[in-house]
């Protein structure tokens, strides 16, 4: 008899049980052995054996005591959330955001600096220093770092090593090897819109299929089908920034005319606020006349784009990115505009504002490392 064929399922089952126990602990602050036995339908010896292994690996700790129904107190266990960490960077033309997250996906450090992108050793060296500053400021043990995910406003190759077509950064090609001499951890590159959509789907687990509109200084999108990104045949799906909104309309940075980007990115708003998006929303909240006119036109254009996406995908649509984050108080008026375009429905309840509002692109880039690690525990 081939004994190896018997061993493999047993090892897989062990890992499966351990992973389920860890995941249950991760979803809860702390649990007793009996709660895990009940929650997962496992035997007490199996739970004890796996808890001991997780304790030995430094992934969980004894957390405290909990009252049982019988009046006796039971020991509880909790994950050591900072046992592993990951870093996410969000690189845009004029800024860099750096976040550190732990195994619960909690942000444990966050820095944002003004730094104009340039494809030079000086720039990459400054990025490396920023990562060091974050590690120091958040008091992170460097040996806990699983990797650094870098969000780029450009298309990304399937192996996450290369960004191409990054016209927002005004370069044709960007590779992780350029960062590597200054960042001594595994590096993956991510498309900014996909990273943000991933953070959103991680936070809001109820909605597994949706279209994420990334409305920022440039425009992107991501199609999530049952929590997986649909990449397209050439890894450039959901590039809605270049969907045509107006025939022969405004000039787009891609070189063509009438794309959605010049109508629905921050560029359409910040002309009256000295290039500053926060300042634009401040003016709007102050009922500044010009800001109100610009905003009304913006919402009309955005509603057209939303309508087209809805007709194509017939799924929920989430508004994210730096503009999406500001849209809560304008959601009703936007829904009204979108509903007027809809031949099938008199409401646009499918439209929502992102729930993940803190540096979603950076966090989403870091989350990939965390989720991969957790899936292999
Ligand atoms: Zn374009």
Image (cartoon, grey):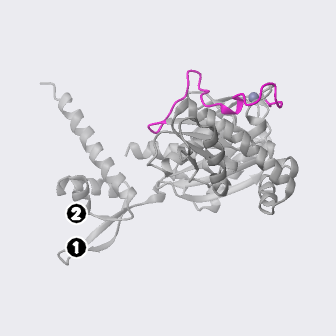
- The residue positioned 57% from the left and 32% from the top of the image is 311
Q: Judge whether residue 232 is colored magenta.
A: yes
Spot occupied by residue 190 in the image (x, y as percentages of width and height): 61, 37
> Which quadrant of the figure shows ligand 1?
top right
Could you tell me which secondary element the residue under label 2 belongs to?
helix
The residue segment tinted magenta is 225-253
Tag on residue 68?
A: 1
Spot occupied by residue 128 in the image (x, y as percentages of width and height): 69, 47
Asked if 316 appears above or below 230 in the picture, the reply is: below
The quarter holding residue 278 reads bottom right
Could you tell me which secondary element the residue under label 1 belongs to?
loop
Q: Of 4 and 92, which appears nearest the observer?
A: 92
Label 1 with label 2: CB-CB less than 8 Å: yes
Spot occupied by residue 121 in the image (x, y as percentages of width and height): 77, 38
Asked if 319 appears above or below 170 in the picture, the reply is: below
Q: Of 131 and 206, which appears nearest the observer?
A: 206
Q: CA distance from mark 1 to mark 2?
A: 9 Å
Q: Of 346 and 348, which appears nearest the observer?
A: 346
Q: Main secondary structure of the magenta part?
A: loop
Q: Residue furthest top?
A: 233
Mark 2 surroundings within 10 Å by alpha-carbon count, few (fewer than 14), some (14 through 19), many (20 or more): some
Tag on residue 377?
A: none
Image quarter where the N terminus lies is: top left
Tag on residue 34?
A: 2
Q: Earlier in the sequence, mark 1 or mark 2?
A: 2
């Amino acid at each position: 008899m081939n004994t190896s064929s018997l061993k493999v399922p047993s090892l897989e089952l062990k890992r499966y049980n351990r992973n389920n126990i860890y995941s249950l602990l991760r979803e809860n602050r702390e649990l007793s052995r009996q709660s895990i036995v009940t929650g997962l339908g496992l035997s007490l010896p199996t739970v004890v054996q796996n808890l001991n292994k997780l304790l030995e690996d430094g992934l969980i700790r004894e957390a405290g005591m909990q009252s049982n129904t019988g009046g006796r107190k039971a020991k509880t266990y909790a994950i050591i959330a900072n046992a592993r960490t990951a870093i996410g960077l969000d690189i845009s033309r004029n800024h860099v955001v750096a976040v550190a997250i732990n195994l619960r996906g909690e942000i444990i450090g966050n820095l944002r600096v003004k730094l104009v992108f340039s494809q030079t050793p000086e720039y990459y060296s400054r990025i490396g220093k920023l990562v060091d500053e974050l590690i120091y400021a958040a008091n992170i043990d460097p040996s806990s770092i699983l990797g650094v995910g870098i969000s780029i406003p450009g298309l990304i190759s399937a192996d996450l090593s290369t960004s191409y077509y990054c016209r927002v950064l005004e370069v044709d090609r960007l590779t992780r090897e350029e960062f590597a001499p200054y960042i001594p951890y595994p590096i993956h590159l991510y498309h900014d819109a996909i990273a943000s959509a991933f953070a959103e789907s991680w936070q809001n687990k109820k909605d597994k299929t949706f279209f994420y509109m990334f409305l920022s200084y440039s425009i992107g999108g991501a199609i999530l089908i049952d929590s997986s990104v649909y990449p397209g045949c050439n890894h450039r799906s959901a590039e809605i920034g270049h969907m045509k909104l107006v025939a022969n309309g405004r000039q787009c940075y891609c070189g063509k005319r009438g794309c959605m980007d010049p109508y629905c990115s921050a560029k359409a708003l910040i002309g009256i606020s000295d290039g500053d998006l926060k300042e634009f929303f401040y003016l709007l909240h102050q009922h500044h006349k010009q800001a109100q006119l610009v905003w009304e036109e913006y919402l009309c254009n955005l509603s057209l784009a939303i309508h087209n996406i809805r007709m194509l995908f017939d799924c929920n649509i989430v508004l994210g990115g730096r503009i999406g984050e500001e849209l809560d108080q304008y959601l009703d008026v936007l829904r009204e505009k979108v509903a007027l375009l809809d031949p099938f429905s008199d409401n646009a309840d499918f439209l929502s504002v992102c729930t993940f509002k803190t540096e979603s692109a950076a966090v989403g880039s870091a989350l990939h490392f965390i989720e991969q690690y957790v899936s292999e525990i």
